[in-house]
């Protein structure tokens, strides 16, 4: 079984999706509402797969806004949005950078808890589905590192059956840096299909058409995320 860590912040104004706010396509309030939806969609995708869900949160003193209890903020969100939440785990992140936090989490799971495989995702990967999580688990039986690439050289999923040196592993372009780190450890890499993420205004140009097209075709979309995005009623200019 793969343990998938969802690295998330509490959905508070000023603490999430700052790239969208800085690009002036959404307010801080809208960003918090959207992020909450994405947390729920990603956690549901992991929970509905064959993986174990671990919600990985930053401590209060590392957040850009005051949050009394980050774990409780995320726990209450997940328990409100998902069913059968008793088996979901919550653990604090350790590390001063994103790469360090992923590395500490993955290495701890693989070496201390001796899980077979471990992976890291963030709520911005709202298109992540159960089939992607399960496909990655299958690929991790053959390759020690499995990545889900997205636009601009980023990754939406990073799975491991063996730890790597995470120093600089998420340097842009992350997909190259992670494969390079895997190669240095003499590990094989494989890939999932490309999926969009939503981290900046530029990402809307991919996310919105895909949402609309999949909805029109009757295919799966992240329902909570789609609902918020459609309610925000972005015009074409905001997606350029």
Image (cartoon, grey):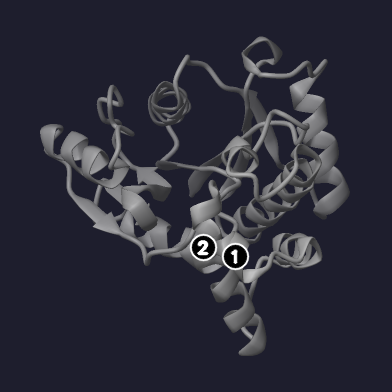
128 with respect to 164 (left or right): right
Viewer-closest of 230 and 139: 230
Evaluate if marks 1 and 2 touch, with contact meaning CB atoms under 8 Å apart: yes
Hey, which residue is sitting farthest bottom in the picture? 217
Q: Quadrant of residue 139?
A: bottom left
Q: Quadrant of residue 72?
A: top right
Q: Residue at x 23, y 38 (%)?
A: 177
Hey, which residue is sitting farthest front in the picture? 237
Residue 68 higher or lower than 189, as above or below: above
Viewer-closest of 101 and 90: 101
How far apart are the alpha carbons under marks 1 and 2? 5 Å
Q: Quadrant of residue 111?
A: top left
Residue 11 higher or lower than 30, as above or below: above
Residue 180 higher or lower than 67, as above or below: below
181 with respect to 145 (left or right): left
Q: Secondary structure at mark 2?
A: loop
For the question of whether residue 192 can be seen, the reply is yes
Q: Residue at x 76, y 66 (%)?
A: 233
Q: Identify the disc placed on residue 237.
A: 1
Q: Residue at x 66, y 18 (%)?
A: 63
Crowd around label 1: few <14 · some 14–19 · many ≥20 (10 Å): few
Crowd around label 2: few <14 · some 14–19 · many ≥20 (10 Å): few
Q: Please state the horizontal and vertical placement of residue 92, each as a whole percent of the image.
A: 62, 21
Q: Residue at x 75, y 68 (%)?
A: 230
Q: Please state the horizontal and vertical placement of residue 41, each as a whole percent of the image.
A: 69, 56
For the question of whether residue 7 can be seen, the reply is no
15 with respect to 30 (left or right): left
Q: Secondary structure at mark 1?
A: helix
Q: Identify the disc placed on residue 240.
A: 2
Q: Identify the disc placed on residue 127.
A: none
Q: Please state the horizontal and vertical placement of residue 144, each as a whole percent of the image.
A: 26, 46
Q: Please state the horizontal and vertical placement of residue 125, each as a whole percent of the image.
A: 54, 53
């Amino acid at each position: 079984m793969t343990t998938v860590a969802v690295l998330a912040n509490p959905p508070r104004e000023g603490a999430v999706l700052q790239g969208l706010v800085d690009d002036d396509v959404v307010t801080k309030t809208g960003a918090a509402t959207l992020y909450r939806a994405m947390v729920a969609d990603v956690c549901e995708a992991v929970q509905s797969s064959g993986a174990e869900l671990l919600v990985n949160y930053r401590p209060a003193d590392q957040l850009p806004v005051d949050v009394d209890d980050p774990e409780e903020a995320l726990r209450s969100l997940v328990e409100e949005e998902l069913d059968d939440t008793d088996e979901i785990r919550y653990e604090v992140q350790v590390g001063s950078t994103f790469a360090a936090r992923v590395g500490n989490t993955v290495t701890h799971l693989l070496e201390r808890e001796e899980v077979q495989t471990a992976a890291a995702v963030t709520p911005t990967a709202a298109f992540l589905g159960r089939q992607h999580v399960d496909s990655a688990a299958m690929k991790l039986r053959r390759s020690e590192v499995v990545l889900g690439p997205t636009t601009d050289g980023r990754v939406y999923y990073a799975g491991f059956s063996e730890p790597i040196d995470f120093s600089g592993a998420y340097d842009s372009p992350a997909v190259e840096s992670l494969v390079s780190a895997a190669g240095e450890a003499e590990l094989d890499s494989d890939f999932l299909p490309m999926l969009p993420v939503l981290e900046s205004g530029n990402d809307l140009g991919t996310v919105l058409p895909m949402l609309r097209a999949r909805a029109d075709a009757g295919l799966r979309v992240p329902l909570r995320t789609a609902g918020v995005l459609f309610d925000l009623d972005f015009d074409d200019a905001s997606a350029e």
